Structure formats: C-alpha cells, structure tokens
Image (spheres, rainbow, N blue to C red):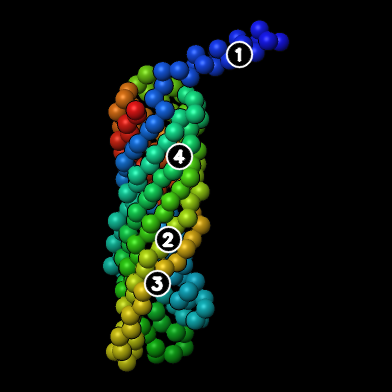
Amino acid sequence: MIVISSQLYLSAKGINKNINRHEISVSYGVFPASEWVGTFTKAISYSILSMGTIHEENNSNFGAINLDYNYRINKIVGVGIGTTYAYTKSDIVFKIKGLNIESHTTENNNYLSVMPKVKLNWINKPVFRLYSLFGLRLNIDFFSTQTMDENNQLYREKGTMYMFAYQFSQIGMEIGKNVSFFMEAGIGTSGTFIAGIRGWF
C-alpha cells in the first residue's frame, strides 16, 4: 500500500510539475446577459405593474470588458475570480392602456460584477487548449433615469440594483504558449462570444 501510494504521489507530482499556476486575461464580450436581462426587467417594471405598453428605441450597448485571474490547481482544474463591466443606454416610451398618457424615459445602466469561477481544461497541448468555464457572480447595476411625462415635467432618478448572475462558457479555445489568444462561446454577463489575451506566469 505504501509503495502504491508513493507511486501515485510521484505520478501526480510529475503530471503537475512545470506548469504555470497563475493566469491573467483581458477580454471583450458581445451580447452579455445584462443587455437582455435589462430589457426583461424594464418590461416588468413599466408594463406589468402599471398595466401599460412599452417599447424601446435608440438602444446602445457597450458589450462587456472582462478582467480575470485564475489559479491552476493542476493541468485540468483551475479556480479564480473575474470582474466585468458593461454599459447600456435606451430610450423607453411608456403608454398606459386606454388613456392618452405617455412618458419618455432615457435610462443609463452601468453594470459591475464580480465572479468566482471554475475552469476545466479538457484538452492540453503545448500551444493549443480547449476548456469549459462556469462561474456565479453578484451583478451591480448603477442606473440613472430621466423621464419626461405627458405634462412635460422632468424627473430624474439614480439608484443601485443587486442581481444574481452567472457565466457558462461551454467551449473555450486558447492558441499560444506563455501568452495566448483565446475565444469562448457561452451565455452570461461576460458575453455570448468572448475574445481576448491570456498570459501565464
């Protein structure tokens, strides 16, 4: 038993030695969840609760900028933490059903999130790797609104909303050795399609 345990220990040590434990990456993601979650939230707050109709126009979306750190426990499993910033702006027209009442709102949303995550490398080559990534996060929405009602009265509001969020990248690809280009496809607050640079040390 002692001999077998020693062999397993030396084998595991051999597999995991000479790997760079620390990963840092910077990336950009398109169509993060904050864009469509924001639209859903507005539909609830403006339409359902007030029995009105809503439509958005002149939407602009910044996408998501991501900064991540990951610690590789071994060649397969890594754990880390990531931060994401995203921005959206939209003009909202709200009408109350059956009444000639209409309001126009410009809403700005600045999203900041922090996410513990797990990364699984399931193909490891010297200059090519495939992986999956999953993380849960707290998403903070720093919002501001400016509303003009039917009487041309202007109302301003600022506030903060806290939301549960996630990122699930079903597949990611890295090309390079100590510094690599990577792409991910998934769903969540980091983006649906993500591309960036990752380095190891």
| Residue placed most toward the observer, 15 or 186 | 15
**First along the sequence among labels 3 and 1:** 1
Secondary structure at numbered mark 2? strand
Q: Amino acid at mark 1?
A: Leu
Foreground residue among 201 and 154: 201
Q: Residues within 10 Å of mark 2 (few under 14, many from 20)?
A: some
Q: Quadrant of the rendered structure where residue 181 is?
A: top left
The residue closer to the viewer here, 99 or 114, is 114
Q: Residue at x 52, y 76 (%)?
A: 48
Q: Which residue is mark 1?
A: 8
3 or 1: mark nearer the eye? 1
- Tell me the quadrant of the picture where the C terminus can be found: top left
**Location of the N terminus (image quadrant):** top right
In the displayed orientation, state which residue is furthest to the bottom: 151
Instruction: State the mark number for residue 80.
Output: 4
Q: Is residue 57 left or right of residue 54?
A: left
- Mark 3 Cα shell of 10 Å, populated few (<14), some (14-19), many (≥20): few
Residue at the farthest right position: 1
Placement of 101 over or under 171, stated as above or below = below
- Marks 4,3: beta carbons within 8 A: no
Q: Inspect the image, locate mark 2, and give the three-letter code of the amino acid beneath it.
A: Ile
